[in-house]
Image (tube, rainbow, N blue to C red):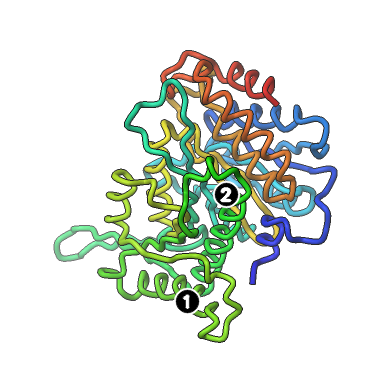
Amino acid sequence: MATPLLRRTLATASAAPKSKLIIGLIPADGIGREVIPAAQRVLASLGTGAPKFEFVHLDAGFEHFQKTGVALPPETLVRLREECDGALFGAVSSPSHKVAGYSSPIVALRKHLDLYANVRPVASVESPESPPEQRRLDMLIIRENTECLYIKQERLETDPSTGLKTAWADRKITEHASRRAGVMAFEMALARDKIRRAKPESEQWWKKNPLVTITHKSNVLSVSDGLWRETVRGVKERDATSAGGPGRYAGVDMDEQLVDSMVYRLFREPQCFDVVVAPNLYGDIISDGAAALVGSLGLVPSANVGDNFVVGEPVHGSAPDIAGQGIANPIASIRSAALLLEHLGHAASALRVYAAVDAVLREGRTFTPDLGGKSRTDEVTDEIVRRL
């Protein structure tokens, strides 16, 4: 049975989507302060047929921590819960070394709002600049968002006899979280298949049944990854009519990949994957790697999804090397805004945004430097708004 959020996502809820949306904007660090305003501008430009928007500007991030000693202010959480229908998060400059008192605000946000799945679509768009060897791909990566090594329970021990240090990190995999991620993966596979079948046959390049690929390393981590694998497989197995289930996923194929083999195949034959579901750490790595197949992290959106709230988030980082120069690629942020609209029930408006972005990419003239172009953030945004 689909969760309340999935029912909204798949447009089967009886309640009509809101005609006005209050969206929290959390630019946070680095280029987040450039790409989130670009996404805001696109949403505000949708006009007829789209909801009316009200934007709430909120604080978070490492730079905010440096100024105040707090990375995720309680006020930000309160206003998200009490005022906002959804949110957009920019990027965070979490340091690679330990900083006393600091913890990533986006990780904390996912925990406090129970945003248990990170949904990351990765799709290629052909343009005059596309290399001839680029393979057609359209995959969706579902990353469990609340546990694994990201619970950040670490400790450092020193051997008193030698003075040598040993670092430990606890890893948490629960049946509850694994099942939620598995259900979302199978529901999204059904939704994607429905969308594909609605297209003309000439545009249906995926000709097979929808496919969910479970990623794990249970040949080594037989307890933790073993539980993940068994639980996600159990979503389909318990659904089977032979097991007394409703058979909802009978038309969805299922396979699995060890995470190292998954990375290999991702780069060798990415066109073989439809929906990939993975624990938190593996999903983080796989989805960033998949971004390389479509040209840039600056193209790939995501949504942090829970039953009651959604936060759109571009997958790129804060990019301190280019922050403030006005050359950051806004497309991942703009696509994340479209993902947010999808999950809030405004699929038609989301499709308009996707189509405008794809048209700019196909034309191949208005690219930021990460894609080999010379255009600025505002120029790319201008072109997308024009095509709305």
Residue 379, quarter of picture: top right
Callout 2 crowding tier (Cα within 10 Å): few <14, some 14–19, many ≥20: some
Left or right, 263 with reference to 140 = left
Q: Amino acid at mark 1?
A: Gly
Query: Which residue: 46% across, 60% down?
Result: 211
Q: Position of residue 331 (x, y in %)?
A: 56, 30
Marks 2 and 1, how far apart at CA: 26 Å
Query: Which residue: 64% across, 67% down?
Result: 2
In the image, residue 382 sits, relative to residue 98, either above or below, namely above
Dot placed on the residue nearer the N-terminal end, 2 or 1: 2
Q: Amino acid at mark 2?
A: Arg
In the image, residue 366 sits, relative to residue 87, either above or below, namely above
| Residue at the spot of label 2 | 196
Between 257 and 74, the one nearer to me in the picture: 257
| SS label for mark 2 | helix
Between 317 and 337, the one nearer to me in the picture: 337
Residue 306, quarter of picture: bottom right
Left or right, 275 with reference to 346 = left
Mark seen at residue 234: 1
